[in-house]
């Protein structure tokens, strides 16, 4: 199952004001007709948060709050420790600490020292059929009356099984982290049923209208591809990662029980060593749910809208603000299903070959005009570029369907005389806003750079021209 990602940004939750962020990011020194991206995404406004900054911060805060409300502090601590172990690996020197502990016991109490080594063998479960070999027969070291030599040997011997144990589990650390975060996102969904309903309604509306548009497209009829496009569209489903919470919390709770048992059973080994070893033993083997970790993606037939994105639907202002952000992303993702489907590295021959030069030339031209960093338009981006060209105007048409000509009127709360239509276009692009010159605007093999997507994706559309009165200039 191949996934297509839109902008790789987590989005905000909570009560915030889309219009306010939008307006504070505008750069009046740059004419929207010269460089719309930089007009919407001011380089010099370091004093105000970009969408990215704002959303990341606010969403993280809300998740943290939900975690504290719903899950015990101990569980959160364990999760954080798992996450740390997954990202940084084992801490340095654990084998030294263990070796030192053995040395002390060996010097003071031979029976305890032997018990210590036996426990260590049990921890690693290294005996096969009751036998152990070489360095890994830790309990044999008790036969050595030279405690210093035995401790040194232990230090070497313990390193390998610990790493083996770690490596065996390291895959699961990543999954625990993903599943945990999705679990918390699910907590968010439970609290935001209204936004979930809004996205489901929006999706159904878009799907119905897309089928209508297909019916009205002569080219599809003439090329006998109408039925194919209708079928593809009919297959589309919306997917929300909302029902995973129970499983996630149960998994982490079970891990906590195992972890505590481990600490208790092996406490002779010394706690600071044990905390890592027991985490490794306790980490649940959580399956990868393959959920969206970005704001939206297409995994046909599923259009996946991550619930972090849904937060934007809580905005109480103009509906144009929701359509510019979530609506444009939703339409973009739906576009992935119909513009081109990437099938084993090839394209459906129905549409793509014909739209290829049209879309790619538009992006290539934009690339040479607005180049800020690397700017490459590749064949693999056709899918995404096409989804921009399809999705953004499609979402705007839906907005117009709801608002009628009011869409060209000023938003009452705007301090800058923004019309609903202008705000829509600002948001489509402002959401990918990055201040920085280079890294943040670099695309990848499937996505163009943000400024190119912005400047190429929509400004040719008649609605953009109308909204910004470019024709009059
Ligand atoms: Zn995309």
Image (cartoon, grey):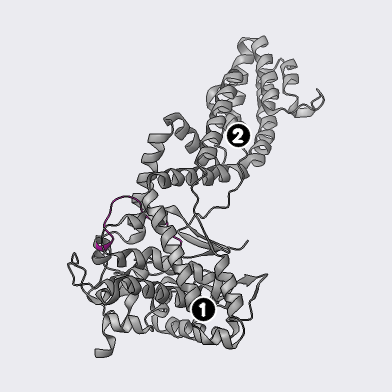
- Residue drawn at (38%, 75%), measured in percent from left and top? 397
Quarter-of-image position of residue 169: top right
Name the main secondary structure of what is drawn in magenta.
Answer: loop
Can I make out residue 30 in this image? yes
Percent of width and height locating residue 240 = 49, 53
User: Which one is in front, 29 or 361?
Assistant: 361
Q: Quadrant of the N terminus?
A: bottom right
Q: Which residue is mark 2?
A: 280
User: Which one is in front, 327 or 39?
Assistant: 327
Instruction: Say which element carries label 2.
Output: helix
* Label 1 environment density (alpha carbons within 10 Å; few <14, some 14–19, many ≥20): some
**Which is more foreground, mark 2 or mark 1?**
1
> From which residue to which does the magenta span run?
8-19
- Residue drawn at (80%, 22%), measured in percent from left and top? 130
Query: Is 248 placed above or below 453 here?
Result: above
Percent of width and height locating residue 315 = 30, 57
Q: Which residue is mark 1?
A: 214
Looking at the image, residue 141 sits to the left or right of residue 55; the answer is right
Q: CA distance from mark 2 to mark 1?
A: 54 Å
Can I make out residue 33 in this image? no
User: Which one is in front, 407 or 355?
Assistant: 407
Query: Is 407 placed above or below 155 here?
Result: below
Instruction: Say which element carries label 1.
Output: helix
- Residue drawn at (47%, 78%), measured in percent from left and top? 213
Mark 2 or mark 1: name the one nearer the start of the chain: 1
* Label 2 environment density (alpha carbons within 10 Å; few <14, some 14–19, many ≥20): many
Looking at the image, residue 277 sits to the left or right of residue 419; the answer is right
Percent of width and height locating residue 69 = 38, 35
Looking at the image, residue 207 sits to the left or right of residue 467; the answer is right
Quarter-of-image position of residue 126: top right
């Amino acid at each position: 199952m191949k996934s297509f990602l839109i902008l790789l940004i987590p989005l905000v939750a909570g009560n915030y004001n889309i219009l306010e962020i939008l307006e504070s990011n505008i750069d009046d020194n740059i004419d929207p007709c010269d460089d719309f991206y930089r007009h919407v995404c001011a380089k010099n406004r370091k004093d105000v948060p970009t969408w990215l900054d704002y959303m990341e911060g606010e969403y993280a805060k809300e998740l943290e709050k939900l975690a504290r409300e719903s899950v015990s502090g101990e569980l959160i601590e364990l999760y954080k420790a798992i996450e740390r172990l997954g990202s940084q690996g084992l801490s340095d020197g654990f084998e030294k600490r263990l070796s030192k502990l053995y040395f002390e016991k060996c010097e003071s109490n031979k029976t305890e020292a032997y018990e210590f080594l036996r426990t260590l063998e049990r921890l690693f479960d290294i005996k096969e059929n009751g036998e152990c070999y070489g360095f890994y027969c830790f309990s044999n070291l008790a036969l050595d009356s030279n405690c210093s030599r035995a401790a040194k040997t232990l230090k070497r011997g313990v390193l390998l099984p610990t790493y083996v144990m770690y490596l065996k589990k390291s895959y699961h650390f990543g999954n625990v982290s993903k599943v945990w975060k999705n679990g918390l996102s699910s907590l968010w969904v439970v609290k935001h049923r209204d936004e979930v309903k809004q996205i489901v309604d929006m999706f159904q509306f878009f799907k119905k209208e897309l089928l209508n548009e297909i019916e009205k497209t002569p080219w599809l009829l003439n090329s006998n591809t109408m039925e194919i496009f209708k079928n593809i569209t009919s297959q589309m489903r919306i997917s929300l990662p909302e029902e995973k919470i129970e499983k996630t919390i149960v998994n982490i709770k079970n891990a906590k029980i195992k972890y505590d048992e481990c600490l208790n059973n092996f406490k002779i080994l010394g706690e600071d060593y044990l905390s890592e070893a027991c985490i490794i033993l306790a980490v649940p083997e959580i399956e990868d749910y393959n959920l969206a970790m970005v704001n939206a993606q297409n995994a046909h037939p599923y259009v996946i809208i991550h619930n972090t994105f849904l937060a934007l639907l809580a905005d109480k202002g103009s509906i144009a603000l929701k359509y510019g952000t979530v609506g444009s992303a939703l339409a973009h993702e739906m576009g992935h299903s119909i513009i081109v489907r990437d099938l084993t590295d090839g394209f459906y021959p129905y549409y793509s070959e014909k739209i290829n030069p049209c879309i790619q030339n538009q992006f290539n031209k934009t690339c040479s005009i607005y180049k800020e960093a690397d700017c490459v338009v590749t064949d693999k981006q056709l899918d995404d570029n096409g989804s921009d060209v399809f999705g953004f105007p499609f979402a705007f048409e839906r907005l117009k369907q709801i608002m009628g000509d009011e869409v060209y009127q000023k938003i009452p709360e705007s301090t800058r005389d923004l019309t609903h239509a202008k705000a829509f276009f600002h948001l489509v692009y402002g959401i990918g806003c990055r201040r920085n010159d280079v890294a943040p605007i670099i695309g990848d093999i499937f996505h163009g750079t943000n400024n190119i997507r912005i400047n190429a994706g929509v400004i040719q559309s008649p609605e953009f021209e109308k909204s910004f009165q470019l024709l009059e200039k």
